[in-house]
Amino acid sequence: MQVLHKEVGSDYAMSVIEGDSGLEYTVIIEPDDYDACNCGCPDHSYRHHLCKHLRFFLDYLCMIYPAMWIDHFRRLHEEDKWRKQQKRKESDSSVDQESQAPLRQSIL
């Protein structure tokens, strides 16, 4: 992956990232709003989490502008980790309910 173009402000960063496949994705990071972080790749569109292009650009920002971006990097990664845990809990909960459905039917 590589950064083809970047625009960095105090409250946002935007880039065009060339992915491993050669496709280009526009990446937008707003450090104070996890939901505003966006990438045009299918993975981000489907899962709504920090995809590899967003993570790559965050890593890049931390190397180039460490004083400005390291705290944002940590906060966004923690938010991403928490949201993934919540999705797993929801998924586990729905699986438990589905597996108990036949038992409930037999009792009724």
Image (tube, rainbow, N blue to C red):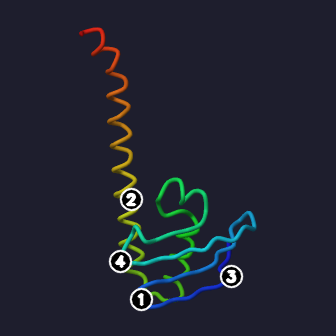
Distance from the alpha carbon under mark 2 to that under mark 1:
22 Å
Q: Secondary structure at mark 2?
A: helix
Q: Which residue is mark 4?
A: 32
In x, y percent, where is residue 101?
33, 20
In x, y percent, where is residue 56?
57, 72
Q: Which residue is mark 1?
A: 68
Q: Secondary structure at mark 1?
A: helix
Horizontal arrangement in the rendering, residue 67 relative to residue 38 (left or right): left
Camera-side mark, 1 or 4: 4
Question: Residue at coordinates 51% horizontally, 89% vertically from top-left?
Answer: 8
Looking at the rendered structure, the kind of residue marked 3 is: Leu
Looking at the rendered structure, the kind of residue marked 1 is: Met
Q: Where is the N terminus found, in terms of image quarters?
A: bottom right
Looking at the rendered structure, the kind of residue marked 2 is: Lys
Q: Which residue is mark 3?
A: 4
Quadrant in the picture for residue 7: bottom right
Whichever of callouts 4 and 2 sits on the residue coming sooner in the sequence is 4
Q: Secondary structure at mark 3?
A: strand
Looking at the rendered structure, the kind of residue marked 4 is: Asp
- The crowd level at tag 1 (other Cα within 10 Å; few <14, some 14-19, many 20+) is some
Camera-side mark, 3 or 2: 3
In x, y percent, where is residue 19?
68, 68
Q: Secondary structure at mark 4?
A: loop
Distance from the alpha carbon under mark 1 to that under mark 4:
13 Å
